[in-house]
Image: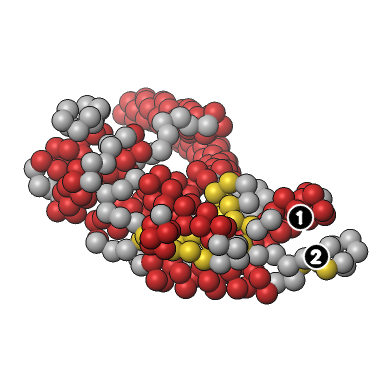
Amino acid sequence: MAQHGVPPTPDNFSVWFYYAMGGSLTLKKTIDILIANKRKFDSAVNRELYVTYVNPHASTSGDFPEQLRSVIASAQEYLTTAIIDNRTQMQNLGEVKSECLGAVDPRPIIERLVEELSHATSRSSALEANFLQTTKDLDQIKDSLKEAEQHSNTDALTGLANRRALEAFLRAAQITAMEAGTPLSILMLDVDHFKQFNDGYGHQVGDQVLRLVAKVLQENVRDCDLAARFGGEELMAILPGAAIDAGIEVAERVRRRIADARLTRRTTGEEISSVTVSMGVAQFRMGETADGLIARCDKALYQAKRKGRNRTVRETEEEIAA
């Protein structure tokens, strides 16, 4: 760990202890590939290794929302009350038992037993109602957290995954590719002359163009892929298990369908000039960083722009040109 600059945290130590002991062949293969390619073990890589191989259920955050804390505290309070009430009831029934041993008239004893049973029933009903309400509160919190997580990973304008979700997905896809020895490709697209749409028709039309391009991209990738907004008018797709030729096919299909689409102004029905995109495609090289992969894809996209736009360029073409 010291040799490769890995901080000696408990999570990191668990990963490297597992690695040193040979507990997982796939973990050993992944780390060996990272070392061979001189990959830096930064916080993101270390976290991904820990979650993937040591503790898949590790929480991404130790902080609970205040509302959740309140519900848990209420449930604990109800449980504590139930335990105290149960002890009190057992004590009272013990007293009744003592009275039974020396009593002649059974009526007072029966009345007391009925009273204790009535109290127990009331307490049980109240406790059940409290727990039912707590369960509903927890369900609402769970739904809210799920919705909040979805919003935090979604780009508001296009409805695609945002940069945060893209980076997390790509890190996991890289580890899977190294672990299984499978290909991984990415494609990046940029709307041609996007500034002209904003300047000539206004930002609302520019937003409409981005939504159209995002819709076409989303419709032409698989369920296991991820379509995302990288930034500005640049969109990306991560294609696990796809070699570069498959990535080129997807990119060309997306490019042609965007070029064939017709966009009209909603208010007037006026047809807007056709939309085209330039695309770059790159394939992951074992052990390289996400930034390195994206940079090569971006260079290919730049070559597509230089060659006249409305075309797809693969990384190898860009490298040959260089």
Viewer-closest of 11 and 171: 171
The residue at 79%/49% (across/down) is 199
Q: Quarter of the image containing the N terminus?
A: top left
Q: Which mark is residue 197?
A: 1
Report if the CB atoms under discs 2 and 1 are less than 8 Å apart: yes
Residue 45: % across, % down: 31, 41
The residue at 52%/54% (across/down) is 302
The residue at 54%/28% (across/down) is 66
Disc 2 target residue: 272
- Which quadrant of the structure image shows residue 182? bottom left
Q: Is residue 165 above or below residue 93?
A: below
Residue 31: % across, % down: 20, 46
Q: Quarter of the image containing the C terminus?
A: bottom left
Q: Amino acid at mark 2?
A: Ile
Residue 220: % across, % down: 54, 70
Q: Is residue 170 visible?
A: no
